[in-house]
Image: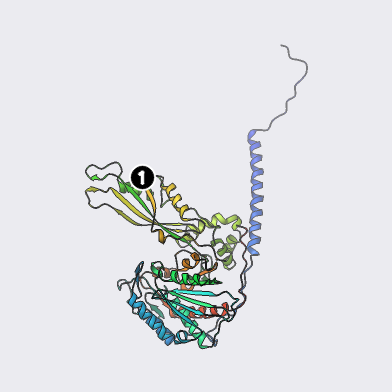
């Protein structure tokens, strides 16, 4: 066909490479603009992040009401450590030593035990409950708690015998119970004795509860005290028990001591993982033994170039940073951090995932953001030439407040993903659901406070004792060479003195926090 006379005009096209290049330039420019804008927003927030100032007067050694830890005060503390008030298992504790310790406290704190203002009650034979009725019945009472018992200790591994109460030249007192928890017992009683000698009459009713079996669950001690208060219809304004310490080197990116108050307590559960297969002689092993199956369920490993799948230890529970009190804790300390720390913590709305990974990477803070997993007991086999028909392992979990016991079991089952591994909960009576969050920090261990929250005596439970600890000190609790600086014990006494004084106000201050950005 002949071409028509009409001419066809063509428009030159740009090369594809140039078009894509222009698009990438625009995207790059947009990325720079967005990144710069986000950085400026974060910078402004960090620069304007306010420090919450609390109006208080520092306690001075020269004050008339300052309690010095010298002379009789130190002697009482030293002597208290020589009572071997050891708890070894549920319902199993040194009753004779507990009775001797009771008599010692009665003798050494005569004002408390003879004052008509104080109602004193022995609970279940060995625990102690003191009540100071307030003059204003409209004010809800509060409770200070500690425990009389300690964990076992032998002389081996100690610089000084654990029940001798030895003071060293550098001013440290060594002994089982110096940190857990006879410092709390003596601290409370010294402060209360001092108050009563000065004619103190509280407006707000005060309870002091000293349990005798906290180290083995507290079922005979604080649990029974809690029931007594519940039967009386008592509802507490708040309670304070042992818990988090004062970190003398602060937290990461903070160059000052930090008092960490546990406003929530992690849950606790132990699970049994069990595999049952036919036994037999080791000369005719199957492809997988009970030990092999269970080992594969627990950890990630490899043989040569053949890897088996990631399981329990290498699949930790997810981080719940921002879903518990840990984020609010960061809000409180952020203004005191270095600029980089302040930049991170004042912008959790954007940098929360990064902070979560940062906390997860440090064993000291990992437990704050997730449920932890610890394989503690492994049982299998009876002889080197016999195939074990049964293999069992115990796995202990400390549960983040954002999870429940059932959540933890379901997660473990999903991770193991092997029907041959049977998972069940052990010691049902010892399992503890995570606590509600009190109106901030998480107590990663467990204390007697659970008995009071289970009985719904209060919504405000604070787990704190101002024992000053460096990075190595927590290892001494339940370990070798437990010790405390006598200067620190003096601070503990004065802490309780001022706590009793301040709690006697008719209106207690409640600080408001802002965590809506999370």
Q: Secondary structure at mark 1?
A: loop
Toward the top, the furthest residue is 1
In the depicted structure, whether residue 396 falls above or below residue 303: below
**Viewer can see residue 246:** no
Q: Position of residue 39 (x, y in %)?
A: 63, 56
Residue at (78, 18) in percent of width and height: 6
Which residue is tagged 1? Answer: 420
Residue drawn at (35%, 73%), measured in percent from left and top?
A: 86
Q: Is residue 49 above or below residue 143?
A: above
Q: How many marks?
A: 1
Image quadrant occupied by the N terminus? top right
Q: Viewer-proximal residue, 116 or 168?
A: 116
Which residue is at the front of the view, 143 or 336? 143
Residue 168 in picture, x, y percent from top left: 38, 80
Residue occupying image coordinates x 60% and y 76%: 138
Residue occupying the far right of the picture? 6
> Percent position (x, y) of residue 149?
38, 73
Task: Estimate how packed mark 1 is, as few (under 14), some (14 to 19) or many (20 or more) residues with alpha carbons within 10 Å.
Answer: some
Q: Is residue 235 left or right of residue 147?
A: right
Q: Is residue 447 visible?
A: yes
Q: Against 212, is 444 above or below? A: above
**Colouring scheme applied when the structure was drawn:** rainbow
- Image location of residue 408, percent across then percent down: 45, 53
The residue at the point 63 percent across, 41 percent down is: 24
- Report the quarter where the C terminus lies: bottom right
């Amino acid at each position: 066909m002949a071409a028509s006379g009409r001419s066809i005009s063509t428009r030159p096209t740009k090369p594809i490479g140039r078009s894509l290049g222009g698009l990438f330039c625009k995207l790059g420019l947009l990325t720079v603009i967005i990144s710069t804008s986000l950085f400026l927003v974060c910078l402004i927030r960090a620069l304007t992040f306010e420090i919450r100032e609390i109006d208080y007067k520092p306690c001075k050694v020269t004050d008339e009401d300052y309690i010095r830890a010298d002379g009789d005060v130190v002697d009482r503390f030293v002597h208290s450590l020589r009572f071997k008030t050891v708890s070894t298992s549920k319902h199993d504790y040194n009753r004779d030593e507990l009775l001797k310790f009771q008599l010692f406290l009665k003798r050494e704190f005569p004002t408390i035990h003879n004052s008509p203002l104080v109602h004193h009650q022995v609970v279940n034979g060995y625990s102690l409950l003191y009540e100071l009725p307030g003059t204003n019945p409209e004010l809800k009472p509060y409770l200070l708690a500690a425990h009389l018992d300690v964990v076992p200790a032998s002389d081996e591994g100690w610089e000084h015998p654990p029940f001798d109460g030895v003071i060293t030249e550098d001013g440290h007192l060594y002994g089982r119970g110096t940190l857990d928890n006879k410092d709390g017992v003596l601290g409370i009683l010294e402060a209360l004795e001092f108050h009563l000698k000065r004619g103190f009459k509280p407006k707000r009713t005060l309870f002091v509860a000293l349990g005798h079996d906290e180290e083995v669950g507290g079922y005979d001690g604080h649990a029974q005290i809690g029931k007594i208060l519940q039967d009386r219809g008592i509802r507490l304004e708040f309670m304070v028990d042992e818990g988090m310490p004062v970190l003398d080197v602060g937290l990461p990116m903070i160059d000052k001591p930090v008092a960490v108050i546990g406003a929530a307590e992690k849950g606790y559960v132990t699970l049994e993982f069990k595999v049952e297969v036919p036994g037999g002689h080791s000369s005719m092993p199957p492809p997988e033994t009970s030990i092999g199956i269970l080992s594969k369920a627990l950890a990630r490993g490899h043989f040569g170039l053949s890897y088996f799948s990631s399981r329990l230890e290498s699949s930790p529970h997810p981080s719940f940073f921002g879903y518990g009190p840990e984020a609010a804790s960061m809000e409180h300390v952020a203004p005191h951090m270095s600029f980089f720390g302040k930049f991170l913590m004042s912008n959790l709305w954007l940098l929360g995932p990064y902070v979560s990974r940062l906390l997860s990477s440090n064993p000291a803070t990992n437990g704050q953001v997730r449920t932890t997993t610890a394989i503690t007991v492994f049982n299998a086999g009876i002889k080197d030439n016999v195939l074990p028909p049964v293999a069992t392992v115990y796995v202990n979990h400390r549960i983040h407040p954002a999870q429940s016991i059932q959540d933890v079991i379901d997660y473990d089952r999903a991770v193991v993903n092997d029907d041959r591994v049977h998972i069940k909960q052990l010691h049902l009576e010892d399992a503890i659901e995570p606590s509600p969050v009190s109106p901030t920090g998480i107590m990663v261990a467990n204390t007697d406070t659970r008995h009071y929250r289970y009985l719904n005596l209060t919504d405000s439970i604070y787990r704190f004792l101002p024992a000053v600890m460096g990075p190595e000190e927590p290892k001494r609790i339940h370990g070798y060479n437990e010790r405390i600086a006598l200067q620190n014990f003096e601070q503990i006494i004065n802490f309780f003195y001022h706590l009793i004084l301040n709690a006697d106000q008719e209106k207690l201050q409640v600080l408001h926090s802002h965590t809506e950005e999370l």
